[in-house]
Amino acid sequence: MEGQQWLDWVSRFTHVATAITLIGGSVFTAFVLVPAAQKLDSSSHDTLAEAVAARWKRFVHIGILLFLISGFYNYIRAIDSHRGDGLYHALLGTKMLLALVVFFLASALVGRSAKLEGIRRGRAKWLRVLILLATIIVAISGFVKVRGGPDSPPSPTITE
């Protein structure tokens, strides 16, 4: 594997692995941890919420950094093969805007800002919004990856 191919693979792997980690962690939190923690008394619940947020915050912040670095690199590498492809640029722009909203929500949910306390109090609702937006981003990414460019045929369909 050449140096450029190696870097392309590392960047793609980093982007996908980060998505798996952060979306998976968010799904676990929304559908397992939050409902289970609601059965705790108020003091225990608050202690658990603070402990989880403190640890999860590292994953969120490092994940956002990895998304930005690998996403920017992947975009730069792909842009030449999509010149004049309006649908590609529209979908990628939508994906990027949605990602910024996801980054904001994820940061707000693990942050300490008093101004964003309302988001943390509505954790269950905002986690579901985050998961929905992340799912839309993954769907856009998958579609853009398999549809090919304006001058290339779509990826072949696997048949048995």
Image (cartoon, rainbow, N blue to C red):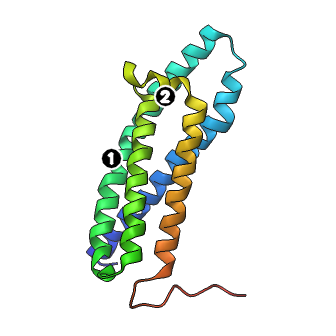
In depth, the one of 105 and 90 nearer the eye is: 90
In this view, the mark in front (2 or 1):
2
Amino acid type at image mark 1: Leu
Answer left or right for 65 relative to 40.
left
Question: Quick check: can you spot residue 112?
Answer: no
Query: In which quadrant will I find the C terminus?
Result: bottom right
Rendered image: mark on residue 79: none
Q: Quadrant of residue 124?
A: top right
In depth, the one of 120 and 62 nearer the eye is: 120
Query: Callout 2: helix, strand or loop?
Result: helix
Rendered image: mark on residue 119: 2
Give the residue drawn at x 49%, y 80%.
147
Q: Would you place residue 113 above or below residue 108 in this image?
A: above
According to the picture, the residue beneath numbered tag 1 turns out to be 65
Comes first in the chain, label 2 or label 1? 1
Give the class, few, some or many, for how many residues have Cα within 10 Å of label 1's Cα (few <14, many ≥20): some
Q: Would you place residue 22 above or below residue 109 in this image?
A: below
Give the residue drawn at x 56%, y 46%.
131
In depth, the one of 3 and 97 nearer the eye is: 97
Q: Position of residue 84 (x, y in %)?
A: 31, 82
Q: Position of residue 25 (x, y in %)?
A: 56, 41
Question: Quick check: can you spot residue 15?
Answer: yes
Contact between marks 2 and 1 (CB within 8 A): the answer is: no
Give the residue drawn at x 27%, y 74%.
4
The answer for how far apart the CA atoms under marks 2 and 1 are is 22 Å
Query: Callout 1: helix, strand or loop?
Result: helix
Give the class, few, some or many, for how many residues have Cα within 10 Å of label 2's Cα (few <14, many ≥20): some
Answer left or right for 72 relative to 29.
left
Query: In which quadrant will I find the N terminus?
Result: bottom left
How many circles with numbers are drawn on the protein? 2
Amino acid type at image mark 2: Ile
Give the residue drawn at x 36%, y 80%.
85
